[in-house]
Every structure is written in structure tokens, then in C-alpha cells.
Image (cartoon, helix red, strand yellow):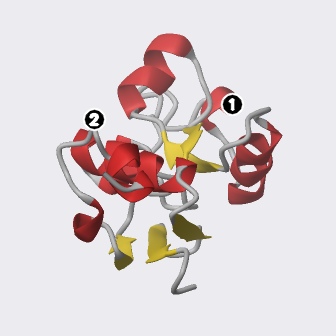
């Protein structure tokens, strides 16, 4: 068993499923992210007003070794908790990659020395692009 196999031993997907470049469309917080509107005043509550720059700064401020991205918060959570319209998560979070299986596989690759993992967060389009290569090929 290779070290590459070891890093994926708890994953439903193998490394072949995530190798290469994958773009996840419209998953990041953008200026177009939906925010609640007060039906009486027609205005967005102050707690739900935010810029992409604020969201990026918030994600970057999270004290963790794993790079964070800004994801949109649901309108329901914004209303219920009076929170900002964004939240931070690891760049391979299942809300961005679309499945828990992909989340686990990207996490395994990121933690493994056998892979080089890079990502680009395009907050203008809302797209997240993740590239995974074998370390000996990068």
C-alpha cells in the first residue's frame, strides 16, 4: 500500500476522481448573494449588508492551517440568527464541492504529501476552481 492509498483509506472516492482541475460554479459569496428583505420597509437589514471584501477578509481571518473561502449563508440563517450573508469554510467544503465524498477526497489530498492541491476563488463570478496533481508531476 502506497502513501497515496493511505491518505484515501476512509474516502468513498479515490484520487482519480479529483485529479485535474474542477470548477464549481456559483458557490462563493458574491455581490449577488441573496439577502433577506424586510417586507414592511423593503430594505435589507443592516446585519445582512456586506461586501465581498468583508467576506474575503473574514474568511482569511479564520485561524486555521487550511485556507478558508467565503460561502453564502442561507437567507433563513441570516434571518434566524441575524448573521452576515456569508460564512467561512475550508476551500474543499462540501457546500462548495457539492458532496461529502468530494469534500473528504479533497481533504485527503490536501493533507497528503503525495498531492499538490491549489485553488482559485473567483468572487466576481462565484466560481471555485480546485486543481489536484500528483506531487511528483507538479
Q: Is 40 above or below relative to 42?
A: above
Q: Name the residue under label 2.
A: 10
Number of callouts: 2
In the displayed structure, does residue 53 sit left or right of residue 133? right
Taking the view exactly as shown, the residue that stands out farthest to the top is: 80
Distance Cα–Cα, label 2 vs label 1: 43 Å
- Foreground pick, 57 / 81: 57
Q: Where is residue 11 in the image (x, y as percent from the top left)?
A: 25, 42
**Could you tell me which secondary element the residue under label 2 belongs to?**
loop
**Could you tell me which secondary element the residue under label 1 belongs to?**
helix
Q: Position of residue 101 (x, y in %)?
A: 23, 44
- Foreground pick, 19 / 52: 19
Q: Residue at x 27, y 35 (%)?
A: 10
Quarter assignment of residue 113: bottom right
In the displayed structure, does residue 5 sit left or right of residue 33? left
Q: Mark 1 points at which residue?
A: 46
Amino acid at each position: 500500500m502506497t502513501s497515496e492509498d493511505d491518505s484515501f483509506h476512509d474516502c468513498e472516492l479515490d484520487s482519480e476522481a479529483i485529479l485535474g482541475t474542477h470548477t464549481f460554479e456559483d458557490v462563493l459569496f458574491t455581490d449577488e448573494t441573496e439577502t433577506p428583505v424586510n417586507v414592511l420597509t423593503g430594505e435589507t437589514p443592516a446585519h445582512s449588508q456586506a461586501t465581498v471584501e468583508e467576506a474575503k477578509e473574514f474568511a482569511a481571518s479564520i485561524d486555521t492551517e487550511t485556507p478558508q473561502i467565503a460561502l453564502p449563508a442561507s437567507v433563513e440563517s441570516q434571518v434566524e440568527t441575524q448573521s452576515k450573508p456569508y460564512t467561512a469554510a475550508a476551500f474543499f467544503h462540501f457546500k462548495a464541492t457539492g458532496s461529502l465524498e468530494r469534500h473528504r477526497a479533497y481533504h485527503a489530498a490536501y493533507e497528503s504529501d503525495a498531492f499538490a492541491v491549489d485553488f482559485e476563488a473567483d468572487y466576481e463570478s462565484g466560481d471555485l476552481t480546485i486543481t489536484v496533481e500528483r506531487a511528483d508531476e507538479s
